Image (tube, helix red, strand yellow):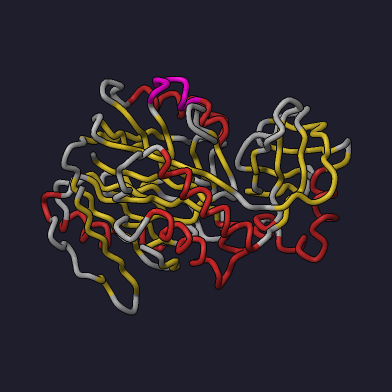
Amino acid sequence: MRIQQHQWTEISGWQPRMPGNLKGDAHLVLVFGSSNLIKNDEKLKEIKSAYPNAAICGCTTAGEIFNTQVTDNSLSVTAIHLQKTSIKTTCVQINDMRHSEQAGEQLGRELDQKGLVHIFVLAEGVHINGSDFVKGLVKNLSPHVSATGGLAGDGTLFEETRIVYDGRAVSNTICAIGFYGDDLKVGYGSMGGWDPYGPERLVTRSRGNILYELDDKKALELYKLYLGEYASGLPATGLLFPLSVRTRENQVGLVRTILAVDEKEQSLIFAGNLPKGYYARFMKANFDRLINGATEAAEKSIETLGTCSPELAILVSCVGRKMVLKQRVEEEVEAVQDVVGPQASLTGFYSYGEIAPPSQDIPCELHNQTMTITTLSES
């Protein structure tokens, strides 16, 4: 695997200048950037011109990761030449959140399953039910095929996200990159680091990813009481205070973050489902635990690589973590680099949701407020 990375900022332009030493040899280019830059056709044309033979995929973000830097209003470009692995890309449209599961099923069918070992997914970040999408995706995947990825971001605006597919910025789209060949080693890890706060509450009224009542109390009213002075900043401040949800049988919760609020219905709209009968608990940030969570995710991501050292690490971290860590945000990326080693190139973005299996041999799930890492290496 050969990798060439570039970053564009308003001040410095392209650093280093494209196309580098890969040029027409690049098979895949990952592009992560702010909404205004991804929508800029000229920038995407420059990337396509530099790497004419590559599949160019990416998304808008809530922050770009370039090696150990975390920036806004930039483009992070990673060109990859695969020596022993082939790729195929596909995409589906999603024009209604209610069709999320069907979109996942369709995406899973689109990719040829023969020789497929891993799928990396980049999905529309606002008009989607991430839980239903992932549920549909895994229906058509063989048990040995892993899937990771994330939901696109739009800063803290939650208005519109774009996916880069075939070198173009497109709306209401989900794309998948399929990796083929036994020589590719794939690792993944996903960890949080949030502290529970207050008692568990029963979800007494909900529909899909819309939460109406907890313990028979209006969800938004209760949530505002919990947030106190932060309530006026909803939905953005909701990223600082997610919910952990679990079934009665499962003691390990999945974290869910808010996408929007409905004042009229006094409800909360989350990135994933909160079924009636589940238990929910408020969460709050713990700086040190967030950094430790990134370290643990990195450690998990290299466990399955065996003797192979990771050559590329794709980081998808939640925008809520970025809002909490603020000027310390690069610490979690540096923590990942410390684990995966200096030989690994880092790229990625801050997202509205992360996709990964909770652990080995378990189908992927939608996560929120995690650091999720996909490590790749060719043996």
Q: Residue furthest right?
A: 216
Query: From what the image shows, is residue 333 above or below residue 250?
Result: below
Towards the viewer: 118 or 98: 118
Q: Quadrant of the C terminus?
A: top left
- How far across and how far down the image is residue 243, in percent? 71, 45
- How far across and how far down the image is residue 223, in percent? 80, 51
Q: How many badges with numbers are in the image?
A: 0
- How far across and how far down the image is residue 105, in percent? 45, 24
Towards the viewer: 336 or 173: 336
- Which residue is pictured at 73% across the width and 47% down the height? 262
Q: Is residue 255 left or right of residue 13?
A: right
Q: Which of the 4 image quadrants contains residue 65?
A: bottom left
Q: Which of the 4 image quadrants contains residue 64?
A: bottom left
Q: Residue furthest bottom?
A: 11
- Which residue is pictured at 79% across the width and 51% down the height? 197
- How far across and how far down the image is residue 333, in percent? 46, 61
- Which residue is pictured at 31% across the width and 57% down the height? 345
- Which residue is pictured at 24% across the width and 30% down the height? 181
**What residue span does the magenta drawing correspond to?**
136-144
Instruction: Kindly tell me whether residue 6 is visible in this rendering.
Output: yes
Instruction: Kindly tell me whether residue 175 is visible in this rendering.
Output: no
Query: From what the image shows, is residue 327 above or below residue 36?
Result: below
Q: Is residue 270 left or right of residue 316?
A: right
Q: Residue furthest front?
A: 307
Q: Is residue 274 magenta?
A: no
